[in-house]
Image (cartoon, rainbow, N blue to C red):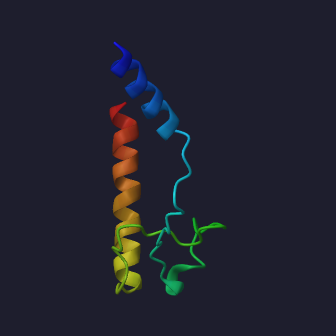
Amino acid sequence: MKSAIIASLIASAAAFAPVKDAKTVVSTNMAFESEIGAQPPLGFYDPLGLLEDADTARFERLRYVELKHGRISMLAV
């Protein structure tokens, strides 16, 4: 019983221990910084890196598909 209490105290104390600062990497493409939806502080947000080496046609295609899927999902609800 005492070991269970001690284990729970250690676990609860670990929840408040300081954590090392994690560096986040955000993939940005300066070509699309001026597009609609790029807002401070992130700017153009592409976490999966889908547009790392894409041109404007690919960007427009992905934007069109995103809008289409959004509209279909709104109709489904």
Q: Is residue 42 left or right of residue 8?
A: right
In this picture, is 66 found above or below 7? Answer: below
The image position of residue 12, as x and y in percent, is 48, 31
Q: Residue at x 59, y 68 (%)?
A: 42
In this picture, is 3 found above or below 26? Answer: above
In depth, the one of 65 and 12 nearer the eye is 12
Q: Residue at x 49, y 68 (%)?
A: 24
Q: Residue at x 49, y 78 (%)?
A: 28
Q: Residue pushed farthest top?
A: 1
- In the rendered picture of this protein, how many numbered marks are placed on residues? 0
Res 50 → quadrant: bottom left
Q: Is residue 12 left or right of residue 1?
A: right
The image position of residue 39, as x and y in percent, is 63, 66
The image position of residue 77, as x and y in percent, is 37, 30
Res 54 → quadrant: bottom left
The image position of residue 66, as x and y in percent, is 38, 58
Q: The N terminus lies in which quarter of the figure? A: top left
Q: Residue at x 38, y 86 (%)?
A: 55
In depth, the one of 25 and 32 nearer the eye is 25
In depth, the one of 10 and 47 nearer the eye is 10
Q: Residue pushed farthest right?
A: 40
